[in-house]
């Protein structure tokens, strides 16, 4: 968070629309791939980043321009000039700390979503920003780095299976958003398994490591919450047909996507409630353990109070104490002290204090 805020401070005082990349450089080079297709034809090729102005007119076919890597400001600016993108849109594309949102312009729509990638080895997930430009017959996607998350969509386009090549650019946008949302389910499933293991450990043997794990999961669910809740608004706008570029024929798909987002939100809230109860359970477990320790110490101290009184009484240096001259007084005192301890422990046992 401090690193992000530090990078944001670079833009302080600059005019709106100033193009500065905010975020980490996650791709070594910027790569732009073009998918052009109809129901019967398909073409895939790499675009020379030094010749963006020579991109052929995107007319009859459906086109998907996949930009992998957004750290090069000049390339993003040149691409924006080719397609007539507003400087504020380019500024948002370069700022990887944006919340999911949707904005409607004259001849295109701009959509921001958050992609979550889970690392099972580190039990951590990373958040990456995905930006989309929806035009009449084209999609421009901006990813922070090359990822395999869209590989299945690309394979469907290459092989001509499914509805992708039969539909327009708006259905392609739905497909890409659907992949992002489906990936949320995978992340939640992995997190649920980790939380379940932590819950079992909490019940059997709570430790400071368990508390650290709970706080880590709470932080992860907070990031998940920040990614999913605004996305509901984005899908809601698409479902209400407020974007003219979205055809009515895709309303059923968008509605299904909206239901998936709601389901993810409910799962996130459920896991957050579970983590809150786990934290309460941990604190209660530690408190109960402390109470058990204090109970044992209290019983030991209570048993030794009368024994200490007897020892203190006969430890006084008075001259006339007749018991001191009795020949069997030493074993008698031992018998008395042991008897008192046994009686008190038996009493504690009867009261179920021990």
Image (cartoon, rainbow, N blue to C red):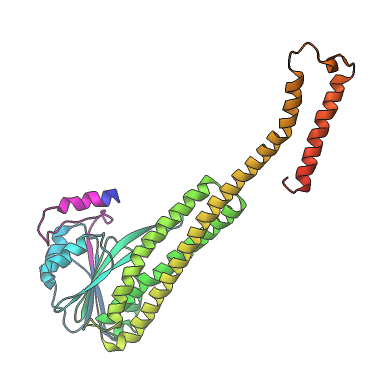
Q: Foreground residue, 308 or 162?
A: 308
Q: Residue furthest right?
A: 327
Is residue 315 visible in the rendered structure shown here? yes
The quarter of the picture where the C terminus appears is top right
In percent of the image, x 80 and y 29: which residue is there?
Answer: 337
* Prevailing SS of the magenta stretch: loop
Res. 224 image quadrant: bottom left
Total number of numbered discs in the rendering:
0
Is residue 52 visible in the rendered structure shown here? no
Q: Which residue lies furthest to the top in this view?
A: 319
Q: Does the magenta stretch include residue 29?
A: yes
Which portion, as a residue range, is magenta? 5-32
Q: Does the magenta stretch include residue 193?
A: no
Q: Position of residue 236 (x, y in %)?
A: 31, 78
Res. 328 image quadrant: top right
Q: Which residue lies furthest to the bottom in this view?
A: 249
Res. 18 image quadrant: bottom left
Q: Position of residue 202 (x, y in %)?
A: 57, 53
In percent of the image, x 30 and y 74: which residue is there?
Answer: 233
- Answer left or right for 11 relative to 129: left
Q: Where is residue 345 in the image (x, y as percent from the top left)?
A: 77, 40
User: Looking at the image, is 76 positioned above or below residue 254?
Assistant: above
In percent of the image, x 21 and y 84: which residue is there?
Answer: 244
Q: Foreground residue, 97 or 65?
A: 97
User: Looking at the image, is 331 positioned above or below residue 98?
Assistant: above
- Answer left or right for 182 relative to 39: right
- Answer left or right for 285 relative to 160: right
Q: Where is residue 35 in the image (x, y as percent from the top left)?
A: 25, 75
């Amino acid at each position: 968070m401090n690193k992000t805020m530090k990078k944001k401070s670079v833009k302080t005082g600059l005019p709106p629309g100033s193009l500065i990349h905010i975020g980490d450089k996650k791709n070594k080079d910027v790569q732009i791939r073009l998918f052009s297709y109809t129901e019967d034809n398909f073409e895939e090729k790499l675009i020379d980043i030094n010749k963006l102005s020579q991109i052929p007119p995107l007319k009859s076919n459906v086109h998907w321009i996949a930009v992998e890597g957004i750290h090069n400001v000049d390339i993003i600016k040149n691409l924006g000039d080719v397609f007539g993108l507003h400087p504020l849109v380019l500024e948002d594309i370069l700022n990887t700390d944006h919340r999911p949102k949707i904005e409607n312009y004259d001849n295109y729509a701009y959509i921001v979503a958050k992609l979550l990638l889970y690392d099972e080895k580190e039990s951590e997930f990373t958040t990456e920003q995905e930006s989309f430009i929806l035009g009449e017959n084209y999609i421009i996607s901006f990813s922070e780095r090359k990822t395999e998350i869209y590989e299945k969509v690309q394979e469907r386009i290459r092989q001509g299976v499914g509805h992708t090549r039969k539909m327009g650019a708006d259905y392609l946008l739905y497909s890409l958003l659907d992949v992002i949302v489906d990936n949320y389910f995978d992340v939640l499933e992995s997190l649920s398994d980790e939380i379940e293991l932590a819950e079992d450990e909490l019940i059997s043997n709570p430790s400071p490591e368990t508390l650290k794990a709970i706080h880590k999961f709470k932080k992860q669910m907070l990031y998940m919450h920040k990614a999913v809740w605004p996305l509901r608004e984005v899908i809601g706008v698409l479902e209400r047909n407020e974007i003219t570029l979205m055809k009515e024929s895709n309303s059923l798909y968008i509605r299904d996507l909206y239901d998936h987002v709601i389901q993810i939100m409910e799962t996130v809230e459920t896991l957050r409630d579970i983590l809150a109860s786990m934290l309460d359970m941990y604190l209660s477990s530690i408190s109960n353990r402390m109470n058990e320790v204090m109970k044992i110490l209290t019983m030991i101290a209570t048993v030794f109070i009368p024994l200490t009184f007897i020892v203190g009484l006969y430890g006084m240096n008075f001259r006339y104490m007749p018991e001191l001259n009795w020949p069997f007084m030493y074993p008698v005192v031992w018998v008395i002290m042991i008897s008192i301890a046994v009686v008190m422990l038996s009493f504690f046992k009867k009261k179920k204090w021990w």
